[in-house]
Image (cartoon, helix red, strand yellow):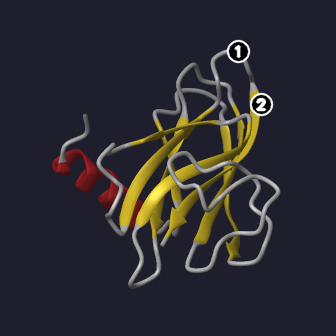
Amino acid sequence: MTTHRNLAIVLGCLAALGCSSAVAVAADGPTDIKIQDAPTLRAGQTAPFDAPGVKAIRRGKPIARGYQLIGQQVDITRGARTAGAALFFRCPRGTTIRTFGLVGNAGFAAADRNYPGHRQTTVFSFAPPRLTHATGTVYAVCR
């Protein structure tokens, strides 16, 4: 479990490096990590995944009114055994995170599992152990 102190350290690193959305962590070798914001998906657009715990977001169906999917795309070419990126998500004012959804084969893990109902959190992304190259997009489901 990540403490508030560890989360503050991660966020401090993001701010210190001037990165708007991600920073490489624990890279020991020639690892290449590219992060870019994915287009925000809004009500009426087609959902790319089934959102766990949110019946209003189903793959191939229109996104329900009041929901937004805030995404970040990750491309990892892993050289080091353990390397990844810390992704910071913040829902628009007046909305909170309900859950996360994934597209692709990159791995993701929430830094703080107590994110539902909060406006922001950090998620870690990594290449699965058996893959040297992984891509994916993680979306925060906001309402």
Q: Quadrant of residue 36?
A: bottom right
Q: Position of residue 117 (x, y in %)?
A: 32, 63
Q: With 20 as the anchor, is 43 left or right in this view? A: right
Secondary structure beneath disc 1? loop
Q: Which residue is mark 2?
A: 133
* Res. 48 mark: none
- Structural distance between the alpha carbons of marks 2 and 1: 9 Å
Q: Which residue is mark 1?
A: 130
Decide: is 31 above or below 53: above
In-front residue for pair 12/66? 66
Q: With 137 as the anchor, is 95 left or right in this view? A: left
Q: Position of residue 35 (x, y in %)?
A: 65, 56
Say what amino acid the circle numbered 1 marks. Arg
Hey, which residue is sitting farthest bottom in the picture? 93
Secondary structure beneath disc 2? strand
Task: Specify few, some or many for label 2: CA neighbours under 10 Å numbering under 14, 14-19, or 20 or more.
Answer: some
Q: With 65 as the anchor, is 133 left or right in this view? A: right
Hey, which residue is sitting farthest top in the picture? 130
Q: Position of residue 53 (x, y in %)?
A: 50, 48
Say what amino acid the circle numbered 2 marks. His
Q: Residue at x 74, y 21 (%)?
A: 131
In-front residue for pair 69/131? 69
In-front residue for pair 64/87? 64
Can residue 112 be seen by looking at this rendering? Answer: yes
In-front residue for pair 13/124? 124
